[in-house]
Image (tube, rainbow, N blue to C red):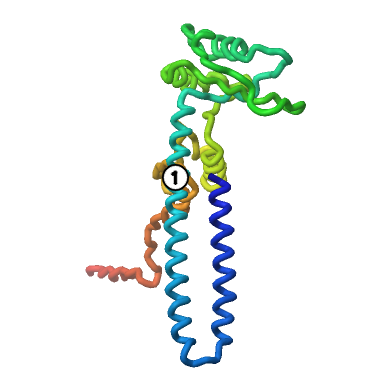
């Protein structure tokens, strides 16, 4: 999909470049009879191609979004565990099962609750690789996910296994709105805007549609001292 987008962008740049060259040649044409005709044909052709490219771009974006949603659904039973110490020839399934039993207080959880489990990426010397865990049932996955706060202080954290595009959207959302104002649930990025409204995002265009300006603070008008009415005290009359 990324290669299709790059090819389309290259084709658009090539078209614009060739059209600019054609337009420059057209401006250098001195025959009065052919200039209006060529100009009209050029503008019609240019409008047609730009419309076609725009339509193709929208179709590709729609297709990419649908493919992304399908991949998110496929990862519905998957979670990532970060910070679990890594050992050679380890049994990742047993490590995760022990971790859940020790910290998450899920007594019915066992190795049979895990369908597949493995480290993500190549081995690193600096830090342990995340563990990708696919559970047998969505309900089990949700119980593990909602119990993640019990891992506080252990150095281990959980996260959803987002697609690359949604991971980039999540990082961008945290930059724009703050770390504590963004979280994920079921593959969707949830955001609290500066005005307190809540939003869900799947792509960068969704972030652009969220208002980033803070709601104006209503100020209480203060009366001008020059407008104050000065009450004069009447003189006291002393009776004799």
Please state which of residues 142 and 1 is positioned toward the viewer in this rendering.
1
Q: Residues within 10 Å of mark 1 (few under 14, many from 20)?
A: few
Q: Is residue 220 above or below residue 151?
A: below
- Measured as percent of width and height from the top left, residue 74 is found at 46, 28
Q: Is residue 144 above or below residue 2?
A: above
Q: Secondary structure at mark 1?
A: helix
Q: Residue at x 47, y 71 (%)?
A: 46
- Measured as percent of width and height from the top left, residue 15 is found at 55, 66
Q: Residue at x 55, y 85 (%)?
A: 27
Check the picture and name the quadrant holding the C terminus: bottom left
Please state which of residues 184 and 162 is positioned toward the viewer in this rendering.
162
Q: In screen coordinates, is 81 left or right of 217?
A: right
Please state which of residues 99 and 119 is positioned toward the viewer in this rendering.
119
Q: Residue at x 69, y 24 (%)?
A: 128
Q: Is residue 16 above or below residue 5?
A: below
Any part of residue 214 in sight: no
Q: Residue furthest right?
A: 125
- Measured as percent of width and height from the top left, residue 97 is found at 57, 11
Q: In screen coordinates, is 3 left or right of 50?
A: right
Q: Residue at x 47, y 76 (%)?
A: 42
Q: How many marks?
A: 1
Location of mark 1 (residue): 63
Q: Is residue 187 above or below residue 31?
A: above
- Measured as percent of width and height from the top left, residue 192 is found at 44, 42
Q: In screen coordinates, is 192 left or right of 156?
A: left
Any part of residue 31 in sight: yes
């Amino acid at each position: 999909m990324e290669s299709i987008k790059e090819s389309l962008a290259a084709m658009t740049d090539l078209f614009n470049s060739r059209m600019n060259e054609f337009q420059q040649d057209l401006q250098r044409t001195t025959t009065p009879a052919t200039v209006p005709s060529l100009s009209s044909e050029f503008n019609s052709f240019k409008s047609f191609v730009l419309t076609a490219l725009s339509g193709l771009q929208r179709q590709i974006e729609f297709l990419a979004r649908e493919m992304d949603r399908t991949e998110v659904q496929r990862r519905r039973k998957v979670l990532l565990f970060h910070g679990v110490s890594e050992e050679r020839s380890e049994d990742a399934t047993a490590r995760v099962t022990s971790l859940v039993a020790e910290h998450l207080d899920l007594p019915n959880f066992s190795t049979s609750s895990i369908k597949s489990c493995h480290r993500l990426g190549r081995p690193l010397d600096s830090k342990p690789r995340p563990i990708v865990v696919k559970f047998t049932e969505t309900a089990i996955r949700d119980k593990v996910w909602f119990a993640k706060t019990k891992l506080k202080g252990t150095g281990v954290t959980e996260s959803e296994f987002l697609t690359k595009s949604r991971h980039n959207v999540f990082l961008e959302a945290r930059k724009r709105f703050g770390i504590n104002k963004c979280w994920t649930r079921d593959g969707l990025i949830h955001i609290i805007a500066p005005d307190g409204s809540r939003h869900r995002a799947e792509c960068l265009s969704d972030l652009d549609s969220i208002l980033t300006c803070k709601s104006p603070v209503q100020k209480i008008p203060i009366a001008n001292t020059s407008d104050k009415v000065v009450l004069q005290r009447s003189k006291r009359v002393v009776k004799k």
